[in-house]
Amino acid sequence: MFKRSDFPDGFQFGASTAAYQIEGHSFGGAGPTHWDDFAATPGNVVRAENGAIACDHYHRWEADLDLIRDAGFDAYRFSASWARVLPEGRGTVNEEGLDFYERLVDGMLERGIKPMITLYHWELPSALADLGGWRNRDIAGWFADYAEILMGRLGDRIWKTATINELWCVSFLSHFLGQHAPGVRDIRATARAMHHVLLAHGTATQALRAAGVGEIGAVCNFTYAEPASDRPEDVDAAATFDDYYNNFFISGLFRKEYPARIVEALGRYFPDGWQDDMELIGAPVDWLGVNYYTREIIAAEPGPWPALKSVEGPLPKTQMGWEIYPEGLLHFLRRCDAEFSHGLPLNVTENGMANADVVVAGAVDDRARVDYLARHFDAARQAIAEGVPLEGYFVWSLLDNYEWSFGYEKRFGLVHVDFETLERTPKASYHALKAALAS
Ligand code: IFM
């Protein structure tokens, strides 16, 4: 592993989690979400598991914050659940929910941990899904209203705020591939969700800024697109993937335009007058979050747009079947800075791996994760050496947790969670990071 002194003074090390994946959504007056509905529909989630109990972080948050402090992390990236704050998505506030987040943030500050909040990490209130969710343009206003309520209570103690986690997942993965809630597979819904998620980000950014909130960032996920061969059709397919996955969102955020190839393919499905929203979508942010895990090998496939498929690659893989490719992290840190964010501070807001971890005699030997993290931290160091303004790195994830449609099967945590007893066991990777951060 690295040494803290290998990184610039003031570099922020942290761990990431998300509300629905750890809290236990059945506690504390939270309203139903589209993830509860999606998980209750047979075939969507492994064993139809949901986030009702998850890691029971709602009750165990103090011990979990102790784990963060004891590892020597500087900051903690967590998310708030819209449906915990506003059970119907709008209207009546669940004060118990706001109280929970206030206790959590104060608990971080008491332990010397900087709170980085994500306002939306995927559990849309069901009442808003009924109204069309991300397909409905009104979601921009609903989201901004929720953001103002939440930050009205917490804003004075938050270190950094991310609006929406992984815009590609909220839109494309959930409305085109149908793998996440609401499980839609429809090109028109996809185009609308892709635009509305950016509009919601911009609308909330503007509203929060007006309310005096600073240090607002956007968080995008990136997957390196490797053409399966030198054949022009494969190269072109990889470029299409790269545009709808990686470039679309940062292009909207930083260039106030969408890639021409995507406008050509999806333009007719965008909402009328979408061009008039680009100024708001490009509302200035203070930092950009980069979530990075893997690459995909892309081959052309005859058929309707996008006419491509992922094929299996040759590199060692994680428990998710994702290739381990740290070069991709370096690539995206360079690309974001050189082509889009131009000197704005960057944070790696998520990076980590799933591993089939087991507890043996009270310990978890996840040396594959230690190696994965060491190689990705090296890539980050290389980016910094080249002048990329990277200011922090958050490992996904603090705890084993609810990995969405994979249920509790895939373990991303630095800390093992026994989902029967909910007992926490720090893994070898946790101890390795702790030693690195102390050195
Ligand atoms: O668990 C997810 C997280 O919610 C968002 N980013 C990717 C992680 C691993 O799949």
Image (cartoon, rainbow, N blue to C red):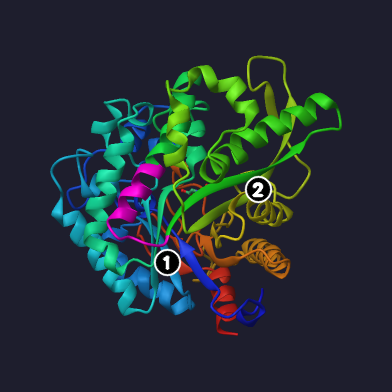
Residue 148: tell me if it is visible.
yes
Question: Would residue 202 be counted in the magenta stretch?
Answer: yes
Q: Is residue 80 above or below residue 384?
A: above
Residue 186: tell me if it is visible.
no
Q: Is residue 408 above or below residue 434?
A: above
Residue 22: image x %, image y %? 36, 54
Q: Where are the magenta residues, as a range?
A: 201-215
Q: Quadrant of the N terminus?
A: bottom right
Query: Viewer-proximal residue, 428 or 327?
Result: 327
Residue that numbered label 1 is attached to? 76
Q: Residue furthest top?
A: 303
Could you say whether the residue bearing mark 2 is in a helix, strand or loop?
A: strand
Near mark 2 (Cα within 10 A), the count class, few <14, some 14-19 or many ≥20, is: many
User: In the image, what residue occupies the spot 15% across and 56% down?
Assistant: 96
Residue 36: image x %, image y %? 31, 37
User: In the image, what residue occupies the spot 57% across and 36% down?
Assistant: 248
Query: Viewer-proximal residue, 368 or 253?
Result: 253
